[in-house]
Amino acid sequence: MEKQGKKDQFLKDLERNTGKTFQQWEDSWLQRRGQEQLKKDEASLKPKPAAPAVPPAEPAKPKPVPPAAPAPKPEKKYQFTVGDKSFDLTKAQINQTYRDPKALGGINAVDFGRAANQAIYQFKKPGPSNLMKRYTQPSVEKEAYDVVLDYLLSEGHADTVEEAHYVMMQLDSEYIQSIVEN
């Protein structure tokens, strides 16, 4: 019953505020709604401007065929001898043979590996390396100035560095060269 009372109150308020009954208000609302919908429908039905004509596509050019990849180079074979057996194998074959004791035919695997490495990497006979040579030679070579200065001071030709400088200025190039060479 309470719902009915609220409905009646709403209808009275509507009539007092708008001056229309609910039926009149609903008809006007549907009419307005219908006019809005008609405008939307007309806009969607209007013919749209034609899209610009697309020029015909040119026939597709054939893609250039990439040149064939060069044939792979044959693997290099390494020749070496272990004991009385000679081998002529690629790196892959050496690895496979090394891992298979039956393929070694009684040859020690360590000896086989050493001979294979010697063939692959072309080891040079042991000798002093450049690094050893560098450390065995004096790292600082004395310049002519130092040699002449030491000579003059050690032989007693000058007692101080300043005196040695003065004496050096008086020496000719041949005499300085003979001091440096000795």
Image (tube, grey):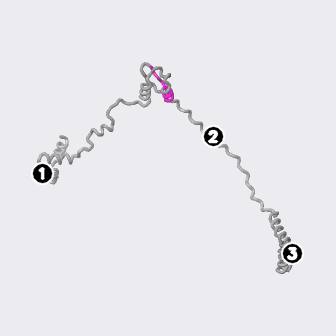
In the image, 6 versus 69, the foreground residue is 6
In percent of width and height, residue 9 lies at 83, 77
- Classify mark 2: helix, strand or loop: loop
Q: Which residue is mark 1?
A: 159
Query: What's the amino acid at mark 2?
Result: Val
Q: Which residue is mark 2?
A: 65
- Which residue is painted at 19% across and 45% down in the image? 147
As drawn, the label of residue 151 is none
Q: Quadrant of the C terminus?
A: top left
Region of the chain picked out in magenta, as a range: 85-97
Q: Is residue 158 magenta?
A: no
- Classify mark 3: helix, strand or loop: helix
Q: Is residue 14 left or right of residue 128?
A: right
Q: Is residue 160 left or right of residue 62?
A: left
Question: What whole-number distance in Å separates the C-alpha atoms at marks 1 and 2?
Answer: 87 Å
In percent of width and height, residue 106 lies at 46, 20
Q: Which residue is mark 3?
A: 22
| First reached walking from the N terminus: tag 1 or tag 2 | 2
Answer yes or no: do the residues labelled 3 and 1 have beta carbons within 8 Å? no
Q: Is residue 93 magenta?
A: yes
Query: What's the amino acid at mark 1?
Result: Asp
From what the image shows, is residue 61 above or below residue 38?
above
In the image, 105 versus 73, the foreground residue is 105
